[in-house]
């Protein structure tokens, strides 16, 4: 994906890394190989690798279309409403979700 013109935030947040580490020195495209993810801080690597492993980035010449996803509204999880102190007034109209059913 690359950082484009906004290329100073990541290097400022992660000491010991250069701007080029965050996009394999390809400012307007990002890393074109999974091995480029190794240049990232450990905390960011799995997200980068996901792009190659699950999202299949390179199958469309680095222009993967958004995958088809079927969305539906559910009740806000308690973990969110407990910290936000906000529950939509119509929340009861939607099905609850069992977060333990997901990895």
Image (cartoon, rainbow, N blue to C red):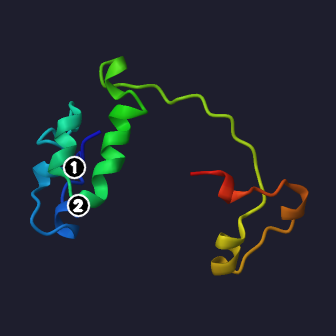
Q: Is residue 64 toward the left or the right of residue 77 in the image?
A: left
Please, is residue 68 above or below residue 4 in the view?
above
Corner quadrant of residue 55: top left
Where does the image place residue 19, in percent across and percent down from the top left? Answer: 13, 54
Where does the image place residue 6, in percent across and percent down from the top left? Answer: 24, 54
Residue placed furthest toward the right: 93
**Neighbour class for label 2 at 10 Å: few (<14), some, many (≥20)?**
some
Image quarter where the N terminus lies is top left
Please, is residue 40 above or below residue 1 in the view?
below
Residue drawn at 18 percent across, 37 percent down:
35
**Neighbour class for label 1 at 10 Å: few (<14), some, many (≥20)?**
few
Residue 80 seen in this snapshot: yes
Taking depth in this image into account, of 100 and 20 the one nearest to the observer is 100
Residue drawn at 23 percent across, 45 percent down:
4
Q: Which residue is mark 1?
A: 5
Whether residues under marks 1 and 2 lie with C-beta atoms below 8 angstroms apart, the answer is: no
Please, is residue 27 above or below residue 54 in the view?
below
Q: Which residue is mark 2?
A: 10
Residue drawn at 73 percent across, 76 percent down:
86
């Amino acid at each position: 994906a690359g950082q484009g013109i906004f290329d100073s935030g990541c290097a400022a947040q992660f000491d010991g890394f250069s701007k080029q580490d965050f996009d394999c020195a390809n400012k307007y495209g990002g890393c074109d190989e999974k091995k480029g993810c190794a240049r990232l801080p450990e905390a960011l690597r799995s997200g980068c690798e996901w792009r190659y492993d699950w999202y299949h980035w390179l199958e469309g010449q680095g222009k993967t279309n958004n995958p088809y996803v079927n969305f539906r509204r559910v009740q806000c999880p308690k973990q969110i409403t407990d910290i936000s102190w906000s529950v939509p007034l119509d929340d009861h109209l939607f099905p609850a979700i069992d977060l333990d059913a997901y990895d």
